Amino acid sequence: MKQLCLFLTLVTFCSTAQVVRVEPQDYSSIYFFGTGGSFNDDEIAVSGYNDMLPNGIPKVYLFNMGLEIVPNGLLHSPETNQNFGGGVEMTNDFLFIGSTTNNSNVTNGGAVYVYKKVNGNWNYLLKLQPPTQNENDRFGSNIAFHDGQLFVTASGYDSNGSSAVNNGGVYHYYLLQDDTFSFVTIMTGNESDFGYGDVLDFENNMMVTTSDGSTTDTVYTYKQGNIIWGLFNTMQMPVFTEFNVNVKASDRVSFSNSKLYMYHYDENSSEPFPFGKRVKIYNWSDDQMQWNFSEDFSFQEGDYLEYKVKVRGDNMYLIPVGWYILQIERKNPVYHYRFDGTNWSYFASYTGMSSVTNDNFGYFTVAKGNKVLFGNSNEQWGNMFLPQNGGAYMVDNTLSADEFDSQSVVLFPNPTNGIISIASTNSELTQIEVFDSIGKSIMVQKSNFDSIDLSSLSSGIYLCKITDNLGRFEVKKIIKN
């Protein structure tokens, strides 16, 4: 019975955790919002265009993150005719924004703009470019900051300087005390591969990245020395041979908890429909300097065969990509699993809030601690015949322990024709808020918590967020007939 319920999340709006939409002002006139983003403890940065192309100019939209997510301004490119567009990395003190099409040195050589937080404001600090650049290097395509060190991927880098080869390279910098960055070295993968540096996962003194090859993909594991990060291991990834399953190496791999997590599809599995989908889990051995297979985490949720995987701590996110077996159009879900100290178990599924199907939820997934930011590049909030507006969503799992018990709030009747009653075992409710199907708040009630009058609303699906005096909340789905 459990598998049936989980499978139904493919075709119904369902979530058992709080998903908060990151909504810029005038969102219906913003395009390609959610193609990149990052966050720190209390802020979010998401890239987008302020108009349709070719007139649209890329911006980075800023948001304050508390009990609600509210717009807090936007950043423009510091250089005229040199646009934002690439990786985004936000820490509590620094904000790094890639500009892969920056032409100030060579065509599409790329750059990274660095901002520093001063008195609550992001002030432009400096521009980073490599000591030497070649055409189409696209420096700034991926950015990571770890332990006072900056890592910047140039997706088009080629050691021979070819503008037509996209091996990829990762530039390593140290942050100095005067807020400058000292270039150390460039790290590269196999010369015949591409996509090196598309993922940069760090934990303590270890780093993992990948590259894609024509016949096999590779995982690279580095460990930090005094200055240089040394390559300690390369591991070939299991390949898919059937059903044209194709997932980038950088999407299949995640590094957390001193473990390597790798999505794999086993076409020879005897497991029930839909076949042998699993996350292979490896432990690192310092003695052998290699990853050793530990266990498989198998799952059946969804009828997809291609998945991205992202793990941070006790949270695993499996993001379906590509086609699905049952050709029933639906919202693209993200499946969330939690680790209880022994096993990974299904926890929730998330989808976007627009009416568009096949909306690419999880286009990018940035997980830090217990929080995760999802991009949703194909959402549409304005005219359906215009380019996609895009979207972004935040899930904060630190709140999970403070949510109501699932049985502490009951709404009835549900579905309803108008008046819906509320029964709660919590001592004191402080607010009831109703959201429409696109995530817009349409009703706030701060008293009389025994019932809600939905008579004035049109038929459809709504979300009701119920909050108590301790800041705990529960989100319930309401169907209005």
Image (tube, rainbow, N blue to C red):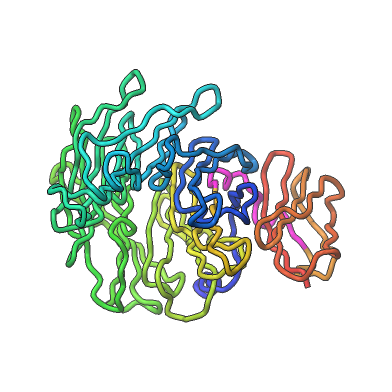
The residue under the point 51% across, 52% down is 56
Could you say which is closer to the camera, residue 316 or residue 85? 85
- Please provide percent x and percent y for residue 193: 18, 58
Tell me if I can see residue 5 in this picture. Answer: no
Magenta span includes 400: yes
Q: How many marks?
A: 0
Q: Is residue 165 left or right of residue 392?
A: left
Q: Residue furthest top?
A: 178
- Please provide percent x and percent y for residue 139: 29, 44
Magenta stretch: give its range: 396-411
Q: Is residue 155 left or right of residue 443?
A: left
The residue under the point 69% across, 55% down is 440
The residue under the point 36% across, 38% down is 112
Magenta span includes 398: yes
Tell me if I can see residue 266 in this picture. Answer: yes
Could you say which is closer to the camera, residue 447 or residue 389? 389
Quadrant the C terminus occupies: bottom right
Where residue 110 sits, quadrant-wise, is top left
Please determine whether, in this image, residue 66 is positioned above or below residue 23. above
The residue under the point 17% across, 55% down is 235
- Please provide percent x and percent y for residue 261: 31, 55
Q: Is residue 19 left or right of residue 123?
A: right
Please determine whether, in this image, residue 214 is positioned above or below residue 397. below
- Please provide percent x and percent y for residue 251: 34, 58
